[in-house]
Amino acid sequence: MAPSSSGQDRGFSALKPGFDSPWRYTTKGRVVSRPLALLCAMRFAPRYLSLIVRGSTCLALATTGLCALAETDPPRLTIEQAVQSALQNNPSLRAARFETQAACAEADKDKPVIRPRIAAEAQKLLQGPAVTFPRGAEDALVLPERYAQIKLMLDQPIYRAGLGDASRRYRAMIDAAESRQRITTNDVIRDVRRAYVQCLVARAMLEVAREAKSVAADHLALVKRMVESGLSAPRDTLSAEADLAEADEGLLRASEGVALAVGDLTRLIGGKTSVTADLLTAPDPLPAAPTTEEAVAQAQARRPELIALRKAIEAAEAGHALARLQSSPAFSIRAAAVHQTPTAFTSQRWAGLGLHMEWPLADAGKTASDVRLAAARRDQLRAQLDEAESGILLEVRDALSRCETARARTTVCAQRLAAARAALEISRMRYEQRAATLLELASSRLAVTKADAAWQQAKLDQVMAWADIRHATAADIAAGTGEP
């Protein structure tokens, strides 16, 4: 077919041989029309291909990033992170905060401040018959059949004996409530650290149980070979199988111990953090323990139990003074404004202002009884303070003693571990020279494992004693870490 005569067609044919039009092309002598969809595909195919390539690249990069993120280790949980989590999420701490708020609200009722009492009353009465007072030609109403009254009253105490004692008692009650909250905080910090160490101990004991099972399995295999060779009696196989079963039972108990220790730690930190034994880290090196004199002085000055008792004694002394002054006169200002149904003796509106004095001259022995009760409460608190000081002194000395004992045991266990490792090297050399049996080598390995476990236990006992020292001296409360 002859090419088209249009200039656009001629130009297209000149540039693209074999094409006589953008809409037609020649194939083996035939003229074929180009479909519109094919033209659009040819025009936009490079752009779509580029978008597809870019999307595939982004998807591959995202997949690689997610895989790398999944392969990274989960975040570790240190002992101080566990303490901070407990300070924020522990249920007993939250309960202690609410209890402190309730105690402060209760103490605020007796706070000696200018706090007037204002009351409004309204009443509507239907009564009868109406009573009139004869006054000549006109009668004045005395008792109406319908009576209404609206009254606004104000009562403001201006003087009461013992105002200074009341202020002192209020401040002491607030301080005592806050100290009781610090008692719970100090106990929770100690419990979290002990639970953390218990998790580390359970994890170490699990490794010991696994090693014991491995040694028992090697022992059973050795006994079977010796029985098959005729070098041992068949009953030795039953004994070795019993040892392996006992090792399995020990491994099961160790696994349950880890689960219980982790559950206790999770409970103390509030259950907001997912905790596993593998996420726990070894504690940092411990600082030097204070001397007995320093620790006792710190405990006497910082323990919240002692502070709470001292504040309670101060409040009790102030209450004893107030009990003796409750029979003294009290003065207050009273005012009233009334809008009511007028009668012959009252107007429709009236207001009054006056000074009110109340002086109980005889109260049937109530003042004397309250004085004796306040004195007994004060003496009881003083006795409790003496007992608490003695108990805390004993607690400080016990924690320091256990810390020193654990440190000495750590040195001894380290020496035993070195000796066990040296014995293991000798057993390995003798086994290679056929001078020792496999059982002797396995026993040497178990001895190393036990010595290592004892060394780890001694180090963790030292951390446990260090946590008790900080609790006994209230070091965390003094350092400001006792609040979230």
Image (cartoon, rainbow, N blue to C red):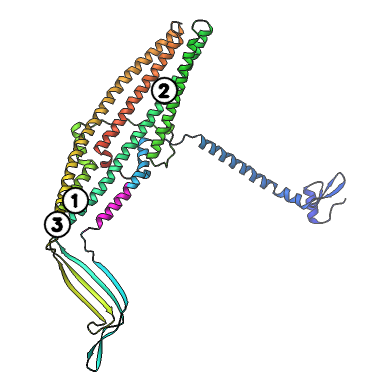
Q: Are marks 1 and 2 in contact (CB under 8 Å)?
A: no
Dot 2 corresponds to which residue? 208
Q: CA distance from mark 1 to mark 3?
A: 18 Å
Q: Does dot 1 land on a helix, a strand or a loop?
A: helix
- Image coordinates of residue 257 in percent, x first then y, are 41, 29
Is 330 left or right of 21, judged from the image as shown? left
x, y percent for residue 13: 80, 50
Taking the magenta stretch, the answer to whether it contains residue 105 is yes
**Highlighted magenta segment, given as a residue range:** 96-111
Could you say which is closer to the camera, residue 385 or residue 202? Answer: 385
Residue at 32% in and 48% down = 97
Q: Is residue 352 visible?
A: yes
Q: Amino acid at mark 2?
A: Val
Q: Secondary structure at mark 3?
A: helix
Q: Give the Cα distance between marks 1 and 2.
A: 56 Å
Q: CA distance from mark 2 to mark 3?
A: 70 Å
Depth check: 461 or 373 in front? 373
**Foreground: disc 1 or disc 3:** 3
The tag earlier along the polypeptide, 1 or 2, is 2
As drawn, the label of residue 367 is 3
Name the chief secondary structure element in magenta: helix
Q: Is residue 219 visible?
A: no
Residue 130 in magenta stretch: no
Q: Residue 283 appears at what percent x and percent y? A: 35, 31
Image quadrant containing the C terminus: top left
Q: Disc 1 marks which residue? A: 315
Identified at 59% across, 41% down, the residue is 59
Where disc 2 sits, the SS reads helix
Q: Amino acid at mark 1?
A: Ala
Q: Which mark is residue 464?
A: none
When the figure is inspected, residue 167 is found, relative to residue 256, above or below; the finding is: below
